[in-house]
Amino acid sequence: MPTIFTQGDLFAEQDLNAYAFGATSSGHMDAGIAVAFKKRWPRLETEYAARCADGRFHLGDVFAFVDGETTVYTLALQEHWKAKAKLAALSRAMTRVVELATNAGVLRIGLPRVGTGLGGLEWLRVKSVLTKVSEHSRVELVVFEKFVRAKPASADAPPATELP
């Protein structure tokens, strides 16, 4: 499947039930988009931190967290938030994500510009990895290149018409 690059609000996309984001292998979700993930799935942080604390989460690893119909793939791209992300770790982790998703029947995964914010990776190099990883896969990566806040339902919108 080709990778789709779009703009919008990752969490407002109606037809996504799988997500991926970059993290450190130190067990903290206190910065960047990780904060949004831990607010939506508080158990994710607990399980992720436990994996990091006991040495089960290293650069290039993937932690697949399942909550009902939603799967969140946490990618170990940095050892610590002060260290730059590693492109090789991204490539390894994304290859594993596509493999895990294929085995689980996940067809679409939404992700931000993974590794480029606090991770410091160059976007064009990341984009190349993402494109290559999903190229011969049934899994479609939906990458939100630019965040655009979803518009809330307008209070000025006319009320829905009720049928008698």
Image (cartoon, grey):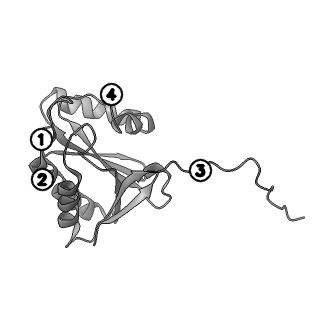
Residue nearer the viewer, 151 or 67: 151
Q: Earlier in the sequence, mark 1 or mark 3?
A: 1
Q: Earlier in the sequence, mark 4 or mark 3?
A: 4
Tell me the residue that label 3 is attached to: 151
In terms of secondary structure, where does tag 2 sit?
Answer: helix
Q: Is residue 32 above or below residue 4?
A: above
Q: Earlier in the sequence, mark 1 or mark 4?
A: 4
> Residue most toward the right?
164
Residue 11 placement (x, y as % from top left): 46, 49
Q: Is residue 158 above or below residue 33?
A: below
Q: In the rendered structure, are the residues bearing label 1 and label 2 in contact, judged by CB atoms less than 8 Å apart?
A: yes
In terms of secondary structure, where does tag 4 sit?
Answer: loop
Crowding at label 1, few (<14), some or many (≥20) Cα neighbours within 10 Å?
A: many
Tell me the residue that label 1 is attached to: 59
Q: Earlier in the sequence, mark 2 or mark 3?
A: 2
Q: Earlier in the sequence, mark 1 or mark 2?
A: 1
| Dot 3 amino acid type | Lys
